Image (tube, helix red, strand yellow):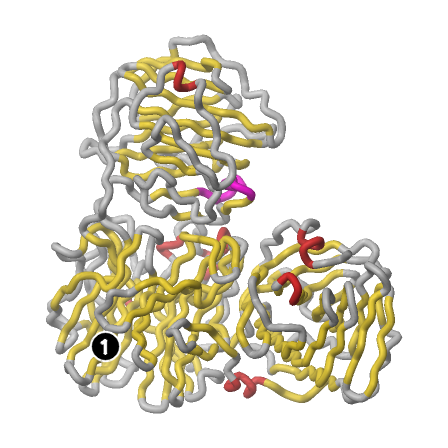
Amino acid sequence: MIRISFLLSLCSVLWVNSAVAQIYRPIENNIMWDSYLLRDDDTYQLFYLQNENYPAVDPQRSSSLLASVGRAESTDLVHWTTLPPLNFESYDNDYSLDGHMFIGQAPVKHQGEYYFFFDPRPRSQPGGSPLYALRSPDLGSWSPIPGGPFLQPTPPYYGGSAWRDLFLSYDPTEQIWHGYLCAQTATRPKRETPLDEFTIALWIEMPAAQHNAGAFCINFADPNGQAFESLVLDQERRWSITSEQERKRISATPPPDPAADGEPILLVVVYEKKQVRIYRNQLLYAIYEGTPLTKRPIANITMGRVSALAGAHHPNHFIGSLDDVRIYNRALNATELGQLQPAQGTAVEFPLSPMAAWTFEDTTAADQAGSFVIPEMNFGASVNQGKLSLDGKLAHLYQTAISTPGMSCIAHVTSPDLLQWKYHPPVFSSLRFCNLECPDYFQIGDWHYFTFSTVRTRMDTSGRKDASGTYYIRSRHRDGPYHLAEHPLLFGSGRGRMDNYVGRAILYHGEHLLYYHTVHGNIRDCIARPVTWGAAKRIVQQSDGQLALAYWPGVEKLAAEISYDSSQATNTSQTSGRGNWSQRGAVLTGTPAGNHPSVLWLPPTENDLMITAQVRLEPNATAGFLWRHRDGSGDALLIDPSSHQVLLAKLQYDQNMDALQQDLIDDYNGFNFGTELHVRIMLRSHRVDVYINDQWTHSTSLIGAAPTGRTGLITANGTARFTQLRIRQLKPLETPTLPP
């Protein structure tokens, strides 16, 4: 039987870019970043961070991308006019930035004037980012407000280095501004002890061809300068320790590692007094001697690269998988080394009581011992089948400072005039997220909500695996306490993708909409083009206060002429696979032959389309839609009500569908729409939006797919009927130019 569950067994995750039907893109060679929307009477002012002249940017220095703040305005949230950007090079501040690093903050209108806050400090500098402000009478000319900085991390509530993404909300009853920021608390519940004697254990799978790579690195907080301990595979493919310490190997030269492709090995490094010993598969591999380590707290840990070295012989990023990583805050003896076993499944037992343990059975890649806060998975690092997968390019796991006292939070400040500020306790703090970026507040009825975005923390939630995007919390009171919803991912992507990022709420003609910016799809390539602003979604409040997203009819303004309607005569012999298709009135019926799926090809071949249809399925049937297919390949939406799955996939096939292969793009699990569905697909530029019964399910990038091609219907495992099928052209997404 060709069920979706069976097809998934053929899948390998395809890192294609995905998003939603695009509404706005920045000018050519610029990249949109975090966006902010200001409602100014009947006009909406869009502010978005942007880098300029993207091809000249070093992709490994993402924090240096931002050179200005792009501008556009609209009256309907669909059609946009590009305006001149805010360029910060002429605004003085206390930090030397070479005109590149400026993080925009919330634009607001206060007493007839416009305010814009910005953060000028590079994130590499300690102490948190101070916020300065600009003021304008007309949104065209801006001048700095003297007396800054106006906001910065302040005890007793806030510390650390996170302090950015200001969002402002005015309370007319209190006549004060409430400000909310991505921040870090001054304290957190659990702290570890500094290390001098300790043990590192890593269960590793690596390719046979790799040389010169960093697998694991601990950076210590040391007042005397750089301090680190790294496990590397050198240019001769031997395992060794690199450090700022002077050490001498006193054992014989070890042999190059003979591991075959994907072969699992256990590496253990024991630090005990003046010795460092490396064990490979329980056998002594190398011994080093040097000055004993002094007790130092951990600053951070990286897996997949060495973060503390530089120079011509810097180790590369590691290729392969880490199955299990542990740190013990003591030197294990020979008997204890023999007891080391990797975690199996979700049942985690640690008889030797590690200080930290990453099993990767949870897609958050969290430390199961609880000493570390949630880590960041950067540039394509992903968790697959209980292992941390690393591609050797830029992918790595970054574990934020174990000794940092704070945890991620949404800071709360208030002001009557946007200049004098009062600091309050956080409205929300969590050890479940490594950061809470771009907080946004709104109220619907008696419920108060915050959204925040995070991509480096990923989890299985809201019908998606390895998900990231925009989460939400809720409370009955503005100042909290706030709690994560049962399904907290309001809008995002699964399978380690980064199709959708910062989402914010805006009140438009009495209803709350979610607007957002989209990114490249693959987390490793998230700073690459194209980055755009997607079509807004309706925020729907359920009776228990939980939120969902639905289709917003406002985007109908993008629709042009009808290119196909199922009430017109259709050539039902234009098929692939084995089965029969027939037409009766406005109903198209497809019945596959046995286990073979069947496809009916429709007339439209345009690249920008809106497809709507009523779909009725027999029990056990699977059905869907195909678009931009050519040469036996293209994208598809597949729906299987019996297994409660909706997925996007790339299909490859021969004419008879005998060699059907499916590469998964993204999926949504757990839906319960029944067997008669209203399906809506918006395909514009490089992105696709999917709604079932007008409930949002997917917003995904399809970069790398064919720009045009055949459109079709597919059914398998049973009969499917498509009624009121209509395909309309969408107006192409334009690339704007700056006004004169």
**Which quadrant would residue 668 be assigned to in this image?**
bottom right
Which quadrant does the C terminus fall into?
bottom left
Instruction: Name the amino acid, label 1.
Output: Tyr
Residue receiving disc 1: 115
Q: Position of residue 123 (x, y in %)?
A: 29, 52
The crowding category of the residue bearing disc 1, from other C-alpha atoms within 10 Å (few below 14, some 14 to 19, many at least 20), is many
**Can residue 55 be seen in the rendering of this structure?**
no
Q: Position of residue 113 (x, y in %)?
A: 21, 84
**Residue at the spot 45% in from the left edge and 13% down from the top edge:** 284
**Which quadrant would residue 647 be assigned to in this image?**
bottom right
Name above or below for residue 640 compared with residue 431: below
**Residue at the spot 28% in from the left edge and 75% down from the top edge:** 107
**Which quadrant would residue 686 be assigned to in this image?**
bottom right
Helix or strand or loop: what does disc 1 sit on?
strand
Name above or below for residue 305 compared with residue 586: above
Q: Which residues are magenta?
A: 385-396
**Residue at the spot 22% in from the left edge and 46% down from the top edge:** 189
Q: Position of residue 11 (x, y in %)?
A: 67, 51
